[in-house]
Image (cartoon, grey):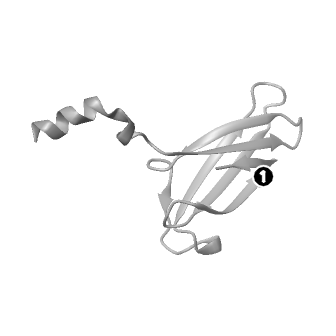
Amino acid sequence: MLRKIFSAFRNPAQYKTPFYPIEVRCNRCGETISARVNLHHDLSLLDEPGPGKSAYLSRKTLVGSGRCFQRIEVTLYFNGDRRLVHHEISGGELISHG
């Protein structure tokens, strides 16, 4: 048992948290905003499958660095394997993801 505990200190890479990166562009000023979704802590389990047979949901509100302060609402739907299957965005557009 102690061997398992100490092995965590020797090899911290195996405990790395997976993140899902996203980039959106503000509809008002055109600013590009980067964010990331923690695939362990930012996902909510859906009671009933959502769009595209999704099992998980993540909602983010993004605000730029000070040009216009437009709020961009991002809703991401993930399947059981935590892969993006659908997205909805208001106030901006998705530029890149994953």
User: Observer-nearest residue: 86 or 13?
Assistant: 13
Question: Farthest top residue?
Answer: 66
Image coordinates for residue 34, horizontal then vertical, percent: 69, 37
Amino acid type of the residue that numbered disc 1 sits on in the rendered structure:
Ser
In the rendered image, residue 59, in percent from the top left (x then y), is placed at: 61, 51
In the picture, the quarter occupied by the N terminus is top left
Residue 85 vs 27, above or below: the answer is: below
Residue 29 on image: x %, y %: 89, 35
Position above or below: 10 against 19? above
Please rate how many residues cluster around mark 1, counting C-alpha atoms within 10 Å: few if below 14, some from 14 to 19, many from 20. Answer: some
Residue at 17% x, 40% y: name it.
4
Q: Nearer the viewer, residue 98 or 94?
A: 98
Q: Residue at x 26, y 35 (%)?
A: 8
Instruction: Answer with left or right where residue 36 lies relative to residue 43.
Output: right
Residue that sits furthest to the left in the current view: 1
Label 1 secondary element: strand
**Residue 6 found in image quarter:** top left
Q: Position of residue 23 (x, y in %)?
A: 72, 42
Q: In the image, what residue occupies the spot 78% across and 52% down?
A: 90
Left or right: residue 16 versus residue 62 is left
Mark 1 lies on residue: 90
